Image: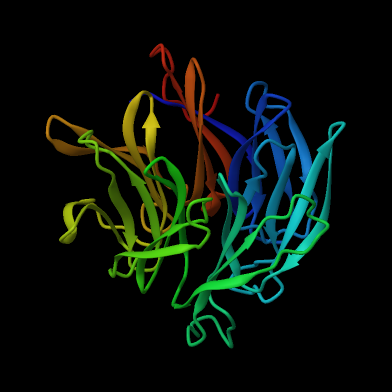
Amino acid sequence: MKLKKIVLDELDHCYAVTVIELGGKPYVLFATEGHGACYMYSCETGEKSTVWEGPGGTMSIVQIPGKDEVLAIQNFFPTFQSKEACVVWGKYSRGKWSFQKILDLPYLHRFDILNTDAGRFFIGCTLCTSKTEREDWSDPGKIYVSRLPEDLNQPMQLEVLADGLVKNHGYWRGIEKGKACAYTCSENGILRILPPERKNPEWTVEVISRTPSSDIAVFDVDGDGKDELISIEPFHGGNMVIRKVSKEGCREIYRYPEKFDFGHVVWAGDFGNKATIIGGYRKMDQKLFMIRYRNGEYVTETIDSRIGPSNIAVLHGEDRDVIYSANRQIGAASAYIYDKSGRALHEENA
């Protein structure tokens, strides 16, 4: 696949990336997990503006649906210096962002906002609950949930939905029977979480797999009408595995053939009008790569290497699709552009 690479900016420890919409226009946000900034770039012009100068330590940024507002994690610093992690609420008005802290939640690593016919709900996943040193995993993580207040000046009423989750790292927003759901993964395996609906006011937690997993994506990659599970295994591990889910359990059907270390990116969806898996890892060759199903088999292709990606976000446009990649190990905010007309070439820089 021919892609054009553009380095948007340099950003030390570039980690979090998300695409949002403001005033009907697409923008991409990149933030550092170190002490430092978050910047916003127009997806149409590339124009840069500052979201915040600090403090940093950002793992996740999520737009509040239908609003020029975001929630974001701050104060989750390497390596696992995250006792002071919190959620901040950002509002965009007249070209500027303003922020206030709304929630302290130590070791919060991933969170999301799920929309249902019963309202909006917050789901937050803590990597652990406490630590004495880097390799201390004796106090496992939890999954917290709350109804998201319409007025975020009002406190969230958090409750623990699941606990005892060792290395509670991965998250994926999915769709189950046409409705929003969440997938989380840890050393305990993969959970599917269904938020409340009017017909079912309770949260539902289902165990999908008991294989220790680090990151997860869910999509119908082979076009048979059933979603596959795509997971990095184990924690920050060296395997990317595709599995079929049935009543009998999860069956492995493919394993990425190359050796890697510190796997951290897994995304699945349509890209360039084809079902695509995008993966990446932060050690060894530090590749960003894609996997597609073609003529009855899975085929891999390297997008870039020696970049060490931490997270990606994908923008779908009428004339192009874009992979925005937080290339952490080289401190770069980058874009990989696919021109749907086929004109774009893969270049080192624009």
Residue at 59% x, 83% y is 130
* 253 to 42, vertically: above or below: below
Query: What residue is rendered at 67% in x and 24% in y?
Result: 25
Tell which residue pokes out farthest to the right in this image: 94
Count of numbered marks: 0
Give 292 or 275, whichever is nearer the viewer. 275
Vertical placement of residue 319 versus 17, above or below: above
Instruction: Report whether residue 11 is seen.
Output: no
Residue nearest the observer in this picture, 287 or 184: 184
Compared across the picture, whether 78 is left or right of 176 comes to right
* Foreground residue among 261 and 142: 142
Q: Residue furthest front?
A: 199
User: Is 55 on the left-hand or right-hand side of 217?
Assistant: right
Residue 41 x, y percent position in the rendering: 68, 33
Image-based side of 135 in relation to 38, left or right: left
Quadrant in which the N terminus appears: top left
Q: Quadrant of the C terminus?
A: top right
Location of residue 152 by image quarter: bottom right
**Is residue 264 visible in this depiction of the protein?**
yes
Colouring scheme, one of rainbow, by chain, secondary structure, one colour: rainbow
Residue 210 x, y percent position in the rendering: 29, 70
How far from the left and from the top, in percent, is residue 17? 59, 45
- Residue 151 in the image: state x and y as whole percent: 80, 51
